[in-house]
Amino acid sequence: MALSASSAFRLLHGMFAVYKPPGIRWKFVRDTIEMKLLQGLNSLKQPPPRQQVLFLPQSNENSSNLELTKVATSVPVLADHVLVKGPRYTFLRIGVGHKLDTRSSGVFVLGIGNGNKLLTDMYDNHYTKDYTVSGMFGKATDDFTDTGKVIEKTTYKHITKDRLERVLAMLQGSNQKALLMHSQVDIKSQEAYDMAVEGQLRPMVKSPPLLLGLRCVEFSPPDFTLEIQCMHETQQYLRKLIHEIGLELRSSAVCTKVRRTRDGPFTLDCALTHGHWDLDSISHAINECKPIATQVQKPDGSLIWEKPDDDSLGNVGRNLQ
């Protein structure tokens, strides 16, 4: 049995992830998803219009003359007709998680309705994120990308994978010290050691960008690709990191690609591609992400996942900035 519009609307409370392609703004993604969801909701079966009783004239013919009488008749309220009041659903409260800039691609988390509360908890939990970042040795540009204005060209024949990995190890080591400092735990304590072993050591307040893991996964000069685990970063920070790696290797480098592969508990496996930004796919994704919603909760343990009682998605707010 097909869902009614109101039933489908009530299912749209929660979190889900999409895959943002490069070259488009995050706001375009959010607005496109809202438009497709509204189109899907308005195409479903709508509540029937209200009925009202009117006394309408009715002719009563007999052999001698023509009489008009008023008869009580139930008719639909014209104000409820779609051509009069317009579409039923015109707004959804959709918030966004950690943003991706125009050049970047990858996992982009959104929340609808009560899912906006979970987005706030994702920020408060300071989850780590994974990126695949590609670079190219031999030149430097004004914006650290391969499409920017070239300001320097250098040689790169002397760069080997071993030298690159030594620079990555140095960067990771310096960031581990910063992580301990911003985690506000005694670095000589057993607690700090246990948290570091379990990978639970992370600052619970806003800190500068931190690199928790750096690994070279492809080296074919002048091109190379890194896997980066980090937190509190921006995509422009990662591009500048590629530039600084080039300087450490007595050369120069530009960033050619930034792709987020994980945002906290959300991975590429649960990210909806553009062809699945529709009502059915998003409703299914929200349902599949309910186990994640039970993990993303406030420090006091109160579960944020709530079952809505009515059509309240469009009543307040919009983006989580």
Image (tube, grey):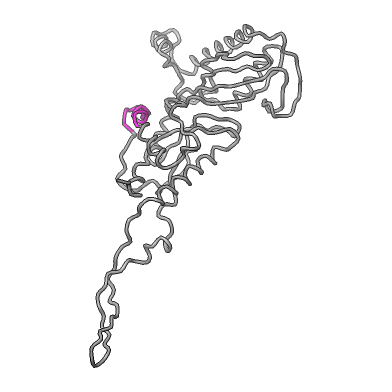
Tell me the quarter of the picture where residue 194 sits: top left
Residue at (42% x, 34% y) in the render? 16
Q: Farthest bottom residue?
A: 64
Residue at (40% x, 48% y) in the render? 41
Tell me the quarter of the picture where residue 57 sits: bottom left
Left or right side of 9 for 159: right
In the displayed structure, 9 sits above or below 68; it is: above
Q: Farthest left residue?
A: 63
Viewer-nearest residue: 181 or 104:
104
x, y percentage for residue 171?
58, 13
x, y percentage for residue 213?
52, 15
Residue at (39% x, 37% y) in the render? 115
Viewer-nearest residue: 259 or 3:
3
Q: In which quarter of the image is the N terminus?
A: top left
In the displayed structure, 242 sits above or below 8; it is: above
Left or right side of 209 for 203: left
Q: How many labels does the image show?
A: 0
In the displayed structure, 126 sits above or below 34; it is: above
Tell me the quarter of the picture where residue 163 sits: top right
Asked if the stretch drawn in magenta spans residue 176, the answer is no
x, y percentage for residue 261?
50, 24
x, y percentage for residue 52?
29, 68
Chain part drawn in magenta: 290-303
Viewer-nearest residue: 128 or 191:
128
In the displayed structure, 246 sits above or below 150; it is: above
Q: Farthest front residue?
A: 63
